[in-house]
Amino acid sequence: MSTTTKQKGKSKDWHHSPDVPIPLSPILDWPPKPLLWLKWISRYWLAISSTTVQLVLACLVYALLIPEPEVMKQLSLAWIAQVWLRNVLLLCLVAGGLHYWFYSLTAQGKKLKYDHRQLAKDSGIYKFRSQVRDNMFWSLASGVTAWTVYEVLYFWAAANGVAPGISLVGNPVWFVAWMVLIPVWSSFHFYWIHRLLHWPPLYRVAHKVHHRNITTGPWSGISMHPVETAIYFTSVLIHFVVPSHPIHVLLHFYIQGLHPAFSHSGFEAVLIQDKKRLNSGDFFHQLHHRYFECNYGTSEMPWDRIFGSFHDGSDEATTATRQRKRQMYVR
């Protein structure tokens, strides 16, 4: 069935796609639509999704695995190594678990798989001639290392009173509001640094490592060059300015470090007995990996629609994106 921007349908270019055109957050729609916005927000906080998984992990890590502030006042290899190892284990749990379910166990076959192609094997463009091993190398050596550096920097600053903090009891309204706003800020930041990374000099030096993954898997999420991870994780520096609780900060790190495993999983959801048990994929970002010069941000905020780079999954959007790409690269 041919798709248009006016009639919903399935995209013929994918093994599986949600109905297109795909929606974006209505947060900046005019006139305002508060009920629609609340419905959109509830998809992230009330449904079983990557967001709820990340929030649960943030609460558990804060309660059980954060060193005491007195320990973190001094930079020492012992607690820094503890943070790095914890982040490695979290990424292995999330990315490794999703990879095992979708690709090793093939528990649901190709049901809800966006791209009909498999992850690359015996390909010379990847380290170890394996897309999965290449992605694991860059994710752990570059991604987790940058993530840990920023996390250690924040908690050292917070322990020494440099970064402003709040408590749930003392600031309940801001505690909840900031929880909701962190994904909005993360989306805004990601849009602009992502466009920067598509600047040809930076793309050639760094971003091309990530974009070798036209077909993506869970380990593709933070499989990035060190230059890119250094830029990518600057989103969390806002907590040096905006008063935050450690749970906010951990949630933000998991949005940056763990959510990409879900958004790059290649599948819309985890199916158990043919029922969706966990929303896992992100067709919005799948479109970026296939067509490159579109969907630089996330669906949480409509920046791509505002700045003319939105691909809604329709045939017309594919044509427009290809024309825009030719104009950008033909000089």
Image (cartoon, rainbow, N blue to C red):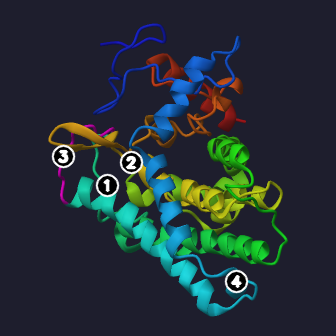
Task: Please report the bounds of the magenta region as a residue range.
Answer: 105-114
Q: Which amino acid does label 4 sit on?
A: Met
Q: Is residue 24 visible?
A: no
Q: Can residue 4 be seen in this view?
A: yes
Secondary element at tag 2:
loop
Q: Earlier in the sequence, mark 4 or mark 1?
A: 4
Q: For this rendering, which residue is in front, 81 or 266?
A: 81
Front label number (3 vs 4): 4
Q: How crowded is mark 1: few (under 14 residues within 10 Å), some or many (20 or more)?
A: some
Instruction: Tell me which residue sits at (68%, 34%) in the image.
Output: 328
Residue behind mark 3: 108
Q: Residue furthest front?
A: 169
Front label number (4 vs 2): 4
- Tell me if residue 302 comes above or below residue 236 in the rendering: above
Distance from disc 4 to disc 1, alpha carbons, whole Å, reads 41 Å
Q: Was residue 19 drawn as part of the magenta stretch in this picture?
A: no
- Tell me if residue 100 comes above or below residue 293 in the rendering: below
Q: Which of marks 4 and 2 is nearer the N terminus?
A: 4
Mark 2 and mark 1 residues within 8 Å of each other at the beta carbon: yes
Q: Which amino acid does label 3 sit on?
A: Gln
Residue behind mark 4: 72
